[in-house]
Amino acid sequence: FSAYLIGMKCCCSCKVDSWIRCVHFFLTLTILYYQLVNGRSDLHNAWMDQSYCYIYLFFFLLFVSSFFYLVASLMNPGYIPKNLNVNQEMKIPDHGVQKLSSAEAVAGDMAKEVSAGRFCRVCCAVQPMRVKHCYLCGRCVRKFDHHCPWLGNCVGERNHKFFWLFLLAESVLLIWGVKVTWSSLQWHMTVEHWIKANLLDLLSFIVIVLATVTVTMLLCYHTYLMMTGQTTWEQASRQRIQYLKDLEILINPFDEGCCRNVSIFLCTCRHTAKDWENIYSKGVYR
């Protein structure tokens, strides 16, 4: 019966996720089509004037944004397999330990001890450091950041950079969209006539402005997280996380410097899981 309920939950979740993606592309394509056929917008004028550089650049940005959205939405965010081997997951490489000072070695033992107590009863798996169970996905996720309802997926170790790249491309596209929509508004008339003449343009403008503010704020926040080596979950729930709650508030054991943090975030191979226990043991006494 439990297996049946879990299956039903996953089935419903997949249906909701599919609808979310459909809504995303429906809104994007509907507003795009309206601005293309709207004779007053910059996009329509560029099309009619055969300004292909303007058109190609706009559609290329739309393609890039959609591509990163689908990648972040559909890919495995970093699920850990169920029934993990405890010794394999919690082991800190011997060569790493040999290079540690005595204080760092103690921190390494503490990292093992702290992580060893984290066990997910749902997945029947030991949770390595920075792993959290997502009850919406029903899986434990490496370097869990948050569950994004607009993606219909968790943001974790494997897809966080694609989520950030989506936010970057989408922010530029939306700012451009604000300019395009603003150009389609008519002026120099009474308020009543202005509302009637600009109703659809005004609705498009409001939707795009709200989306621009939201996405740009998310981009700034996740850029900050990327540069400081943090996650949304760790920053918001620090006092409840076993391996962080006993540390001083200013200590971030996963911060390896801005450049190194950005490099790890953007350039680390998605098939290679980071050894966060080793980084933690060095970061506590850095």
Image (cartoon, rainbow, N blue to C red):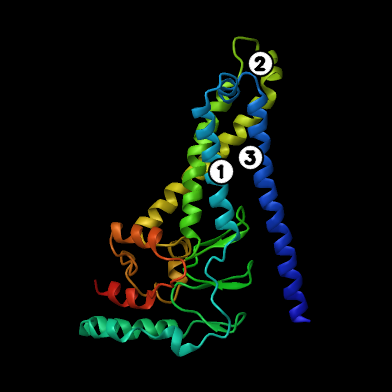
Foreground label between 1 and 2: 1
Of residues 116 and 7, the one nearer the viewer is: 7
Q: Is residue 47 left or right of residue 216?
A: right
Q: Say what amino acid the circle numbered 2 marks.
A: Trp
Q: Which comes before the other along the chain, label 3 or label 2?
A: 3
Number of other residues with Cα within 10 Å of mark 2, as a class: few under 14, some 14 to 19, many 20 or more:
some
Please tell me which residue is depicted at 48% across the width and 43% down the height of the picture.
216
- Which picture quadrant has residue 112? bottom left
Q: Which comes before the other along the chain, label 1 or label 2?
A: 1
User: What is the quadrant of the C terminus in the image?
Assistant: bottom left
**Secondary element at tag 3:** helix
Q: Say what amino acid the circle numbered 3 marks.
A: Thr
User: What is the quadrant of the N terminus in the image?
Assistant: bottom right
For label 3, the residue is 28
Foreground label between 3 and 2: 3
Instruction: Using the numbered discs, state the Cα–Cα distance from disc 1 to disc 3 in whole angstroms.
Output: 11 Å
Q: Which comes before the other along the chain, label 1 or label 3?
A: 3
For label 1, the residue is 63
Instruction: Using the numbered discs, state the Cα–Cα distance from disc 1 to disc 2 in whole angstroms.
Output: 34 Å
Q: Relative to 286, is 267 above or below?
A: above
Of residues 179 and 284, the one nearer the viewer is: 179
- Which picture quadrant has residue 235? bottom left
Q: Say what amino acid the circle numbered 1 marks.
A: Phe
Please tell me which residue is depicted at 28% across the width and 61% down the height of the picture.
257
Instruction: Using the numbered discs, state the Cα–Cα distance from disc 3 to disc 2 in whole angstroms.
Output: 25 Å
Number of other residues with Cα within 10 Å of mark 3, as a class: few under 14, some 14 to 19, many 20 or more:
some
For label 2, the residue is 194
